[in-house]
Amino acid sequence: MPGDTPTISKSDLFARLAEGHAAGITVVTPNRRLAQVLKSEFDSFQSRKNLPAWEDADILPVGAFAQRLHEDALYAEGGGDLPVLLAPAQERALWESALGDAPLLSVSQTAARCADAWRLAHAWRIAGALEKFPGNDDTQVFAGWAREYSKRCTNQGLIDSSVLFDFSYKNKIRKPTLLVAYGFDILPPQTADFLRKFELLSCKPEEKKSKSLRASYPSARHELEAAAQWARARLEGGAKRIGVVVPDLQLRRKEVARVFSGALCPGWNVPGMAATAMPFDISIGEPLSGHALVDCALALLALCFREIDFETSSRLLRSPFLGGAEQEFAARARLDARLRRQLGKQVSLLKLIGVIEGCVLLREKLESVYAVKEKIPSKSQSPQEWARHFTALLAAAGFPGERMADSAEFQVRAKFNEVLGEFSRLSLLNSKIPVQEALNQLRCLCADTLFQPETPEAPLQVMGILESAGLEFDCLWVCGLTEDAWPLKARPNPFLPVALQKKAGIPEAAAETSLALDRRITAGWRGAAAEVVFSHPEKDKDRDLLPSPLIAEVPRGEIEAPAFKTFREVIFASRVLESVEDGKAPPVKEKTVRGGTRVLADQAACPFRAFARHRLGAEGLEAPQEGLDAMQRGQLLHSLMAGIWGELKSSAGLSSNLESLIRKSASAAIADLGLEGRFAELETQRLIRLAGEWLEVERARKPFEVIHIEEKRALEAGGLAFGGRIDRMDRLEDGTHALIDYKSGRATKSSWLGERPDEPQLPLYAVTAPESVSVVAFARLQPGAMKYSGFSEKEKAIPGVTGAKSWSGLMQYWKTEIQNLASGFAQGEARVDPKDGFATCRYCDLQPLCRVHERLGALEEEEGDE
């Protein structure tokens, strides 16, 4: 504060505020949270007097106070000549236009950084020296951008928040009789000069006698859990105001919310408990675009004007914020599951409308949206006009649905409407913009707007470093104070000359000033509560961490806090044990089973997988991918080889020119799959190269004749009947036969060995074939690794195939293993028993059903992941 500013105690301040608005006192704070807390403390002060009602105290952040003065002057007599104050979105848009055609990776982010630098330069009175002070290329370029930005503001009669403190009002405005500055630590020259314009007093929090302790924990997660347990103990002990400071709160917000919810409100994530008000409040909100209601609105608007990815359209279909969602909730979920098999990676509005079946209300709403969209001119329009069109499109979709919104959703919708209003105000700067730019700007506004729905005042506050300044608590815990995290490193603004920042005294510009500031903040923490805990993690993965030197003098001590049980531990402690045999299902009634030989492969991998997939019909939801998935690539490969050998018939044809045959077969395979355009051309070329390289492998073989291609066969094993399809069977020179299975990925003969062989399909064909089989082989069609792999009765029957020590023994082993797998499935064997632990479960889509993680230990999980 200015050195000659008189001070006032906090108790005297509250007594003066209690006199009401007639006293003409306004209190300003450095941030919004401190203003809210101070106002709440004043209300408690008045409440203790048993008053039925009292006048609200005029307490607000200093920036909001300056903005209020401008609004008063604007609406006062003669205010029509005042410049218009830019909203934050308008500031960014004006900076983006000032950047011009600069070759930047992200114009939006650069504009935001420029706005920060511009505000910092004015706050510390260095804006006038930007072009005179020597700097690097970045600072010189910024000086040019700033000159252009300032010129545009002047020409259009605009001002921004950076110069609001310096503005002089010639007309009469309503000024407070007395202005009290509360809790200011850093006071830039611009703010100090602004405060001098008023009759000023200063006030600061009352320092408390505190007991400080220092503690360390194995990891950051353990530290956070300990803080949550401590907070619960102090809350149950009667503390009214508890603070927890997490320096990297913005990055760890979700983790913090999860840990504190589990400790303070066990069972918070159990159905029916989520609506319970939490006894803690996190100071940093989430991006507005991350809230489900806003995500639905932005997805719907994007779908109206371009294709969107399937995952976004899937969330839109299942959203409760579209009209008719309550009546069609289950039907839309089934529709989503079906469309995952029908639609590609990208989805348009017309395509989506065309495939909707069984959801009449959804189809009606989307058709209404399309009808409104068709009436919107395709030409560029002003943001105000686009905002009106966007509102009409959302209304046509029945947004935000029919169900009763809870408090959080109601506030989110109100905030979204406010942001939509801010977007429309961009018309002041942008006369006409195309629809995609309009959507991008609205999306950026929602992403940049941090929002947290208001909740009843909570006794526990979880804050970042800046939010904790000036606050008082009954007890306080500060986390994460390692030597590399606290004090903060110098972080000068890259667009302002570093020497100029140091000369101005900006704390973040130099290590010594940053250290001095962090010392004051640490001292403020030590006097903010009667009990203060400073803590730090001991390790970050394998790296050892040391405590910050700013807390080195704080004595170590034991934190008195019981270890509260989690909701899960409480349930397990009160359980009544009941044993149920769940590894055995009823025997299979029908002899013919669906799924073909895949049943045996699943039974080998895990009996429960085979039971769930082929008897219960359970399957994971598919996710459409860009291009072709593994199944489609396999179809192309089989169609290609079938076309080639359907013409050649035998190895004798390999001596002729095969270029036209290969091209013809590749084109036919592409056409069968329905591929078109440039993608079809690229896939055709790929198949041509693949076939050419593979036929060179075939030429190295002894003469053979291809007698079966993609032949369907009825198979039996273990009392079950299967449907199968042989990729290819060759007749060799000695009259015996070779079974061949095409593979485009990794395939080894070891998958046929051991207990419960991984790939029992080809062995099943071999032991049930009426022909005399002497070779069972994978044909691995992988560029750069083309080869045969398998077993044969005789050595060197096919290059790359290994001769078996005992062919009859191998066939008997296969017969036994297949019999065991088939009979196990037939008899209802359904135990959760992955063959190779978590390696088997890695890509299985049934884990939520079998809950295998509850059966296998954490050590097994780690081993399986390596």
Image: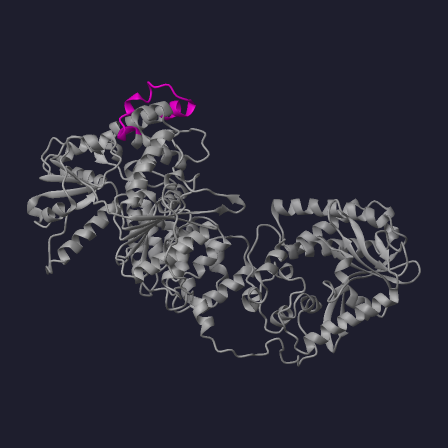
Query: Taking the image as drawn, is residue 115 in sight?
Result: no
Give the farthest residue toward the right: 734
Q: Position of residue 368 (x, y in %)?
A: 38, 58
| Colour scheme of the rendered structure | one colour
Give the farthest residue toward the left: 22
> Looking at the picture, does residue 206 appear above or below residue 311?
above
Question: Is residue 127 located in the magenta-colored stretch of the structure?
Answer: yes
> Looking at the picture, does residue 141 appear above or below residue 632?
above
Left or right side of 52 for 323: right
Q: Which of 388/97 is in front? A: 97
Q: Quadrant of residue 378?
A: top left
Left or right side of 37 for 734: right
Q: Position of residue 349 (x, y in %)?
A: 45, 54
Q: Which of 204/302 is in front? A: 204
Q: How many marks?
A: 0
Q: Position of residue 294 (x, y in %)?
A: 37, 53
Query: Taking the image as drawn, is residue 44 in sight?
Result: yes
Left or right side of 774 for 858: left
Residue drawn where x is 17% and y is 34% of the image: 195
> Looking at the picture, does residue 486 appear above or below residue 495?
below
**What is the span of residues highlighted in magenta in the rendered image?**
121-142
Residue drawn where x is 29% and y is 52% of the image: 475
Q: Position of residue 745 (x, y in %)?
A: 70, 52
The quarter of the image holding the N terminus is: top left
Question: Is residue 166 located in the magenta-colored stretch of the structure?
Answer: no
